[in-house]
Each structure stands twice: as C-alpha cells, then as structure tokens.
Image (spheres, rainbow, N blue to C red):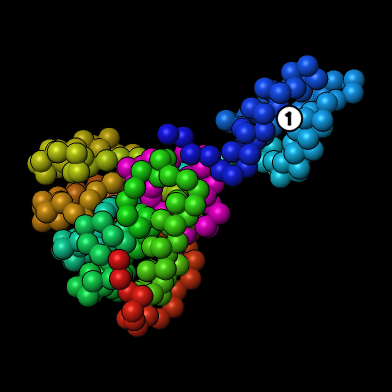
Amino acid sequence: MTSFSPLEESCRLISVLCVWGINSDRICLNHINNGVLCIASLHPRPLSMLAKMCTLLLSALLVTAGSLVGRAPPKVIESCVQPNTVAMTFDDGPYIYQTVVSDVLTKYNVTGTFFVNGDNYDCIYDSDVVDRLRYTFMAGHQIASHTWSHPNLKKLSANKITEEIVRLDTALLAILGIRTNFMRPPYGNYNTLVRQTAADQNKTLITWDWDSGDSVGESYQDSETDYDKIVAEHPTTLLALNHETEKNTAHYLVEYAVTKLLDAGYKLVTVAECLDLPLYASQGPFGTRDSTWQC
C-alpha cells in the first residue's frame, strides 16, 4: 500500500472532491508524483459554491506545494567518491559477532561501518549489547543508522518513518554520545516519501554498489568467490554490503575480503571517509543508564 505525506493526501482528497462535484465548472486538476502538486485551471464563468470552496482549498495548498516545484528528492548515495577506497559495511547488529568483525578490521589497521538497529536481533540497550557497541565504536569504526526495528520503510507513513529514525537516534545519543547523518534503509528499500522524511531528520540515505550475498543464502565460500571476482574487475571504488549477524561472515569472510582488497591496493575506510564527509554530525560523552534504556 502506497504511503503519502499529509500534503499529498490533502491534494488527492480535494482532487477527488472537485472532479466529482464540479465538472460543469471546468475545474481541471493535474497530478504530479501521485498528487504532490495540484494545479487548478478555472473556467472564467461564475463558479458554484463547491467550486469556490475547492479553489480556496487548492490555493492554500499551492502555497505549500509551490516550494516543491522543480525540487528533486534528496539523492541516495550508492557509491564512494574517493578514488581507490573501499567501504566495508555491516548491517543488522549490534549482534554477538560484532566484536569479532571489529577485531579483524583492527588487526589489519582498517576501519568499517556498522549500520545498526535498535531492536532487531538484540535490544540495543541490553548491557552486553551496549558493551560491544561501545567496543566497536572505541576501535574507530563508524556507527550509523539502520532504523529502530528494520521495517520496510516503503510501507510506512511519514510519522512511522520518523519514529523509526528518531528512536534509534535517541539510543545512539544516549549510548555513544553521537548524532549520525547516515542511514541505510532496511532491504535498501525507499521511495520519495522515505527520502524526504529522512532528509527532514538530517539523514543521508546510503545503499551499496556491491553485495557479498552473505544474507541471501550464499555460503561464505561463494561470497569469497564473489570478492575474488570484484577484486579482479578492480573498480575505482567499492561500497560493499555485508552482515555482522552472519557467523561465517564474521569468522571467515571478513578476513578473507580484507586481505584480498589490501593486496589489490585498496584503502579500506569508513563510509564517511570514502565520501569525504564528517564521521558524525556531533559527538559527545557516553550517557549513563537510566529507566529509559529499554526496548
């Protein structure tokens, strides 16, 4: 089911009302992007009371909608921009294998990016989860948003999308003292509403340009072969999707991939570094556990 913003819903409702009730008055409504913009073309002869009402309502909406004309939706970043960089990213944690992944990256003096949830595999406020998240953060790896509960954002309203973003933001600020500008939509799914709502929360959407396949049934050996193939192709940059929740990824695939990529001459960095952007919007001290730390 398609989700619409309040402006979109208002335009759609008024359009139905006007087209149904005042065809005789030549109120013509055009829709752009499922009703983001409503345009009324009025016949010069006297209008009925309903037509006048529709005209007034549309005029008010057009004041708001006018700012959207010609404005492209916020872009989604799919690739790194700094030459010869690889950003290895790890989704769906913080999970029990996160510190294993962190230690492998640290062993080779490289950094990665962890797109974490608030309540997916584990509750982010659990003591052991807080400990491993802080461990990874203190090791120099980037922590970014993957929403609170890992829903398909395309199926949510603007209010629900905002709740998913804000609830995790609150947790990351309390636990790590950070505000992140980076968010990966679960499943890589997004639409115009998701893009705009994320932008309203100062989030840049990050997807990927290469997938290790570790979360869709591939064995780690198959994923290693996939890394061999992409290294042989030697693209200028790589933004690689992996999952810290996969045991074999943590224990086998990460080290294999890191050594292959380093041998090929790549620099393994965070998403922020590969985009030449700040790591965090802000960074402060860790918070202290209180009664709000619960899922």
Depth order, front residue of 268/134: 134
* Residue that numbered label 1 is attached to: 39
The quarter of the picture where residue 132 lies is bottom left
Q: Residue 220 appears in which quarter of the rendering?
A: top left
Horizontally, residue 247 falls left or right of residue 28, namely: left
Pinpoint residue 2: horizontal percent, then vertical percent: 46, 34
Residue at x-position 37% and y-position 69%: 171
Residue 190: x, y in percent? Answer: 43, 41
Eyeballing the image, is 105 above or below 84?
below
Q: Residue at x 49, y 66 (%)?
A: 281
> Taking 21 as reference, is 207 above or below it?
below
Residue 275 visible in the displayed image: no
**Residue reaching furthest to the right:** 45
Q: Residues within 10 Å of mark 1 (few under 14, many from 20)?
A: many
**Residue at 41% across, 56% down:** 164
- Camera-side residue: 71 or 191? 191
The outermost residue toward the top is 24
Q: Is residue 20 above or below residue 158?
A: above
Quadrant of image for the N terminus: top left
Query: Looking at the picture, does residue 51 appear above or below residue 183?
Result: above
Residue 197 lies within the magenta run = yes
Q: Which residues are magenta?
A: 180-202
Residue drawn at point x = 69 percent, y = 37 percent: 69
Give coordinates of residue 259: x percent, y percent. 18, 53
Going by the numbered disc 1, the residue's amino acid type is: Ile
Q: Is residue 178 visible?
A: yes
Q: In this rendered view, identify the residue nearer to me: 20 or 81.
A: 20
Residue 15 rendering spot, x and y as whole percentages: 66, 29
Picture mark count: 1
Secondary structure, mark 1, is strand
Q: Quadrant of the C terminus?
A: bottom left
Image quadrant where residue 250 sits: bottom left
